[in-house]
Amino acid sequence: MAEQVKVGLRGQVVIPKKLRKKLNIENGIILEIEETAEGLLLKPCNPVAELKGLGKNVFGEPLLYQRKLRDEWDCQK
């Protein structure tokens, strides 16, 4: 499904309404633009996805860490 759009004076393009609706691209959304071998790729920016997995194994096994914290809290009472 190829669409044609015109590039404006400042390099702006308008994403056709049909595609905006289909892909949930709303006013104010931030898009990433990436150069690929085939051209340019536009995709929604998701800063939370970049953080995924950063804390992995920082505290070890989650349930064991939770038990350790509860034991520490019980000792402080």
Image (cartoon, rainbow, N blue to C red):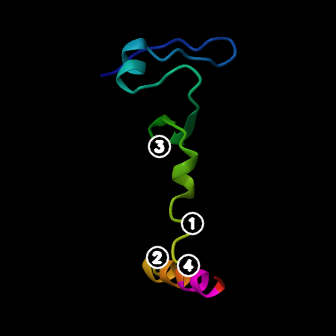
Residue in front for this viewpoint, 24 or 18: 24
> Tag 1's secondary structure?
loop
Q: Is residue 60 visible?
A: no
Q: Amino acid at mark 2?
A: Pro
Q: Which one is in front, 17 or 72?
A: 72
Crowd around label 1: few <14 · some 14–19 · many ≥20 (10 Å) = few
Residue 7 % position (x, y): 58, 14
The amino acid type, in three-letter code, at marker 4 is: Phe
Task: Give the left or right position of residue 8, taking residue 17 as reference.
Answer: right
- The CA span between labels 2 and 1 is 14 Å
Residue type, mark 3 in image: Ala
Res. 37 mark: 3
| Residue 3 x %, y % | 38, 17
Cβ–Cβ under 8 Å for marks 2 and 4: yes
Q: Which residues are magenta?
A: 71-75
Q: Position of residue 52 (x, y in %)?
A: 51, 59
Q: Is residue 33 above or below residue 67?
A: above
Secondary structure mostly seen in magenta is helix
Question: Which callout, 2 or 3, points at the residue further toward the start of the chain?
Answer: 3
Give the CA separation, mark 3 to mark 4.
40 Å
Quadrant hosting residue 45: top right
- Label disc, if present, on residue 12 of the rendered structure: none
